[in-house]
Amino acid sequence: ILFYGRGKCSTCHNGPYFTDFQFHAVAFPQAGFGKNGFGVDEGRYNVTHNPFDRFLFRTPPLFNVTKTAPYSHSGSVARLEDAIIAHFDPLRFADPGKMTLRERADLLERLGPASREPLPASLSDDEVRAIAAFLAMLDFEKNLGPHR
């Protein structure tokens, strides 16, 4: 109920593959050099050069999501629960006192596009765990046919 209701997960993670295959913004932290090589991955903008596409990334399918860590476009989030939290509380894991000026400016830039998304309600840690448990039910093993 949380996935389809207050969590608003199904707004983007819908359909038979639990994805709309569209581009959306979540203020995930950046890890690594990014596509442009300067430590800022600007997402869809790197292809279209349309300023409105800055920090937009394709919604990933959720099948086997518990087996695909780390999460986010850059793999900067280790736990599934933290990836869920980043959708509605991206500042929970930010420590501005330990960030460089560039990192703080980058976070501020990511928050703008992310704020235009249909944000879920604030979820408790128990509700986040419940959504993660629901997502674990989407796991499956590839059927390799009869055992020989």
Image (spheres, helix red, strand yellow):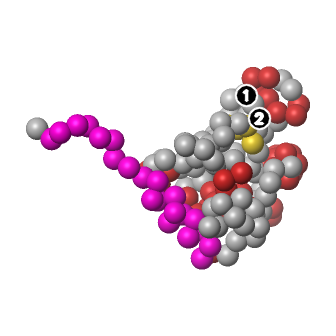
Amino acid type, mark 2: Glu
Answer yes or no: do the residues labelled 2 and 1 have beta carbons within 8 Å?
Answer: yes
Residue 141 spot, x, y in % from top left: 34, 47
Residue 142 forms part of the magenta stretch: yes
Residue 132 forms part of the magenta stretch: yes
Can residue 98 be seen in the rendering of this structure?
A: no
Instruction: Return the residue nearer the eye: 67 or 77.
Output: 67
Q: Which residue is mark 2?
A: 42
Q: Which residue is mark 1?
A: 36
Residue extent of the magenta highlight: 126-147
Residue farthest top in this picture: 48
Neighbours of disc 1 within 10 Å: few (<14), some (14-19), many (20+):
few
Instruction: Return the residue nearer the eye: 70 or 148.
Output: 148
Quarter of the image with the N terminus is bottom right
Can residue 57 be seen in the rendering of this structure?
A: yes
Give above or below for 5 relative to 11.
below
Instruction: Return the residue nearer the eye: 26 or 140.
Output: 140
